[in-house]
Image (tube, rainbow, N blue to C red):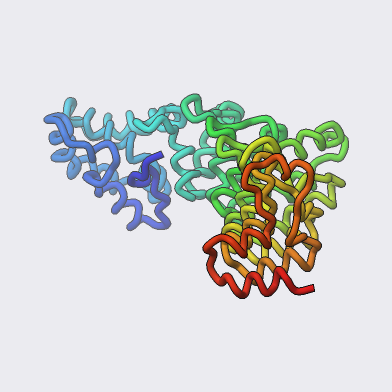
Amino acid sequence: MATETVFLVAPIDKGDALNAFSSIDTWPSLQNGSDPQDELAVQSAGQVLQAFCKMPPNVQKEFAEYPGIVKLGLEKYAESGDASSTVEWIVSQIPSMLFRTDRTGYIPIEAALESGNGAAARMMLNEAERVGSLDRLLGYRNARYGHTLMMLAVHLNSRDFADIFERLLNFDPTSVHRCYDLDGCNVFHRCTKSKSCTSLQIIFGLLINLSSVFLKDKIRHLKDALEMTDSKKYTPLHYIALDGNVEMLESLQRFLRHKNINISFDACFKDSRLLTPLMLGVQNGQFEVCKWLLENGSVDVHFKQHSTCLTALHFAVRAGNPELISLLMKHGADPEYIDSECDGVADYKTPLGMAQTEDIPNKQACIKILTRS
């Protein structure tokens, strides 16, 4: 989704609330040009602001959380000239705004979550509970993009908002493995793709604390979700390897051990030219992640692309990375790897053959490591 001015602001005191309210010209709804009615609304801001200043600070703060509604209220004031009725109208409209989409197709809580505005998101959940719409809001799923609120909540990435994750997960624990967006991502993809380690840890912690009776029949689905590839053919592990995030790997391992889940650390489409997490880590020079995967992830160091017969060692050679070549060989990688399938691949070269015949960085250093006994 295209980046735009954050729709919601979470002011912390009366002064901030007033600033948010009076900065009418910065609101998203006024940024694509104006029409005469918009101009009248902006001109009328001063009169409505006077009425706003008479309100209690907590009410001012709530209004400042809903700039889109206040903007519509100013338009209404431009038509009626009655500040008091305008303020009353704004108050009456706030609950309905919970499910009103903006031009991007987002409702307000989605914009708040994606921008990391947990305070605004929490306030909206509380407001939905007050008006009897909490279940509807917790279960909301975006029709245009396919994501759930939990998928956007990963951007909060703070234990200060663990209660939001808890409300969402308790409402529908199956959403973490059942729901995928239009890019084929589940909530685990979203956490790892956005580098939201704290969010991933919160979700794992909540899943660990769920009733074992409830999870008994869900373990297989959690395993599937962690091994599932998205539209890029990446699993959550691929994104961790790409980013080099060892902390995420350790959090994942603790969760897997606690729930006695075994996942494939070599997960990928085996009939493609795509990469395993180890191959991806090697290709991107992520030494610590590769070391962790080899020591803890039960990866097959000779796992190969079936269409090319290339292994992780081939990718380390092609990258000209002596440190990774040494690491892989320490864990059993064969510099002269070949099998019956490789015989059928045109122009196949062993890792050593690749180093000797191709133009690679650090050529002599790589060959020296590959040829030592």
Q: Nearer the viewer, residue 242 or 54?
A: 242
Q: Relative to residue 302, is residue 58 drawn left or right?
A: left
**Going 71% across and 35% down the picture, which residue do you hit?**
173
Q: Nearer the viewer, residue 172 or 192?
A: 192
Q: Quadrant of residue 8?
A: top left
Q: Relative to residue 27, is residue 95 drawn left or right?
A: right
The image shows residue 144 at horizontal and vertical percentages of 46, 26
The image shows residue 71 at horizontal and vertical percentages of 27, 36
State the count of labels.
Answer: 0
Q: Quadrant of residue 244?
A: bottom right
Q: Quadrant of residue 68?
A: top left
Q: Nearer the viewer, residue 157 or 19?
A: 157
Residue 203 visible somewhere in the drawing: yes
Q: Relative to residue 37, is residue 242 drawn left or right?
A: right
Residue 201 visible somewhere in the drawing: no
Q: Nearer the viewer, residue 165 or 224?
A: 224
**Going 72% across and 68% down the picture, which residue do you hit?**
327
> Which image quarter is the N terminus in?
top left
The image shows residue 366 at horizontal and vertical percentages of 63, 70
> Which image quarter is the C terminus in?
bottom right
The image shows residue 181 at horizontal and vertical percentages of 56, 32
**Going 86% across and 40% down the picture, which residue do you hit?**
212
